[in-house]
Amino acid sequence: MRKHFWWVTFVVLLLSGTIVGWRSAGANKSDGKVNSTLNAKELFNQYVNSLYQTAGLQESGLAFDVFEKAVTGYTNLKLAHQLPENSTVLTVVDFTKSSREKRMWIIDIFNKHLLLNTWVAHGQGSGDEMATHFSDQNDSHQSSLGFYLTDNVYMGKHGRSLRLDGLDSGFNSNARMRDIVIHGANYVSQAAINRKGYVGRSFGCPAVSPKVVNRVINTIMGKTVFFINGNDDTYTSKYLDETAPLNFIATDTTAFDLARL
């Protein structure tokens, strides 16, 4: 009951900004009923767009379609109870962008706020300036696409680091075995870009600047969603299926009743 109540509250807050438009647009003139499937999709899209605009993500360089994928996965993981109730942080890494660009975004979904936009490295086996190859194989030194959950903090050879658990079988599920973690690296900086023309590369880890590593780790540790996007037509994920989020919006009439109060 507690999880259900939290989710009802969560959805009310997320969708309250678009609920009026949804109801006015969704009425069927002939019988006054609402096309719930169609409008659930519209409502979800409106919410994602509202979050995208409010958080200033377009201005920061995050592509809308990449953000939409990340939010879809985040919502699926919430509905599947794979996240703690208070987990509202989403990290997006877009490896379709040059490593010269700040291509990691940490977003507070609940408060619609961009917490950090910074550089992040890809694996040396994935390419030089651009990441063009991806693998989940050990010793490939390539980055792995997909959805992860952040886990515990530990002290390793790169100092304070954060473990990642890959959730997409065949794409990143070997992350633990490969020691794919978030850590600081001196080659992730403007100085490195000035010297070489692009950020240095890791052995597959999404390494960040030592100047922000503690901030990154402290913000996203403890079961938050971490999504890596890239140019790979073979990538698929069950977390990109919109069925569960749309069904939840369409069938949980309690949330919509509460939204009118």
Image (cartoon, rainbow, N blue to C red):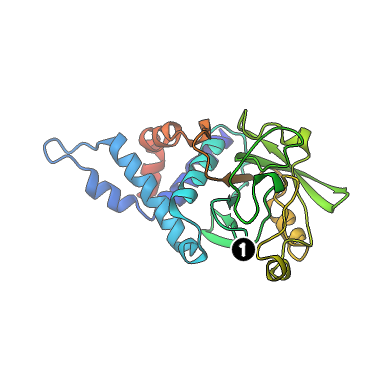
Give the percent coordinates (x, y) of residue 260. 35, 49
**Crowdedness near tag 1: few (<14), some (14–19) or many (≥20) residues, C-alpha within 10 Å:** many
Residue 64 visible in the current orientation: yes
Viewer-side residue, 227 vs 52? 227
Name the residue nearer the viewer: 154 or 36: 154
Q: Quadrant of residue 117?
A: bottom right
* Residue in the picture at 66% in, 62% down: 198
Whether residue 261 is visible to the viewer of this picture, yes or no, is no
Q: SS of the residue at dot 1?
A: loop
Indicate left or right for 254 with 205 as reference.
left
**Residue drawn at x 30%, y 52% as measured from the top left:** 20
What's the residue type where badge 1 is placed? Arg
Q: On the rendered structure, is 94 left or right of 207? A: left
Q: Residue furthest top?
A: 169
Is 178 left or right of 74, judged from the image as shown? right
Residue 129 picture quarter: bottom right
Q: Give the residue pinned by disc 1.
A: 100
Residue at image position (41%, 57%) is 50
Q: Position of residue 91 (x, y in %)?
A: 60, 51
Residue positioned 37% across, 43% down in the render:
256
Q: Nearer the viewer, residue 36 or 99?
A: 99
The percent position of residue 205, horizontal first and vertical second, equals 73, 47
Asked whether 74 or 121 is in front, the reply is: 121
State which quadrant residue 147 falls in.
top right
Q: Is residue 101 above or below residue 37?
A: below
